[in-house]
C-alpha cells in the first residue's frame, strides 16, 4: 500500500478487507456510518472507484480508522 491512506486501488482494498485487521476495520466503519459504507460499496461495484473514494473520505479521516490503516500497512509490509 502506498503512504497516503486514500491512494490505494479498490482491488487492494478488497484484498486487505479479507484480513483480520481489515475485517475489524470494516466492522468499525459499519458502526460509524453504515449508509456511507454501503453507498461506497455500491459505487465501487458499479466501477466508480473515484466516487467510492470520495464517499469514504469522512470515514477515513477518523483517528481510529487511521490507526487501523496504519496497522494494515505494518501487516502488509511484514
Image (spheres, rainbow, N blue to C red):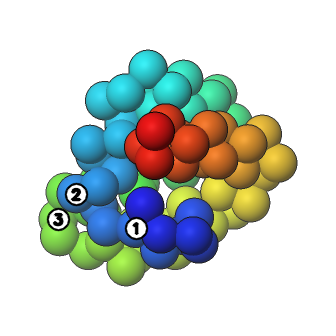
Residue 50 lies in quadrant: bottom left
- Tell me if residue 26 can be seen: no
At x 51% / y 27%, what residue is drawn? 21
Residue 45 higher or lower than 68, as above or below: below
Sooner in the amino-acid sequence: mark 3 or mark 2: 2
Q: In the rendering, at what x and y percent does residue 10 appear?
A: 29, 61
Q: Secondary structure at mark 1?
A: loop
From the image, which quarter does the N terminus lie in?
A: bottom left
Q: In the rendering, at what x and y percent does residue 28 appear?
A: 63, 29
- Tell me if residue 61 can be seen: yes
Residue 30 higher or lower than 55, as above or below: above
Residue found farthest to the bottom? 50
Q: Out of 55 and 8, give the one closest to the viewer.
A: 8
Confirm or deny contact between disc 3 and disc 2 (CB under 8 A).
no
User: What residue does disc 1 label?
Assistant: 8
User: What residue does disc 2 label?
Assistant: 11
Tell me the crowding category of disc 2: few under 14, some 14 to 19, or many 20 or more residues within 10 angstroms, Cα based: few
Q: Out of 47 and 9, give the one closest to the viewer.
A: 9
Q: Which mark is residue 46?
A: 3
| Distance from Cα at disc 3 to Cα at disc 2 | 13 Å
Amino acid at each position: 500500500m502506498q503512504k497516503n491512506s486514500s491512494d490505494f486501488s479498490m482491488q487492494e482494498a478488497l484484498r486487505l478487507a479479507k484480513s483480520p485487521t481489515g475485517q475489524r476495520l470494516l466492522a468499525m466503519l459499519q458502526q460509524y456510518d453504515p449508509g456511507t459504507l454501503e453507498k461506497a460499496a455500491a459505487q465501487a461495484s458499479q466501477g466508480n472507484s473515484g466516487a467510492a473514494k470520495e464517499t469514504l473520505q469522512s470515514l477515513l479521516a477518523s483517528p481510529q480508522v487511521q490507526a487501523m490503516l496504519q496497522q494494515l500497512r505494518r501487516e502488509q509490509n511484514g
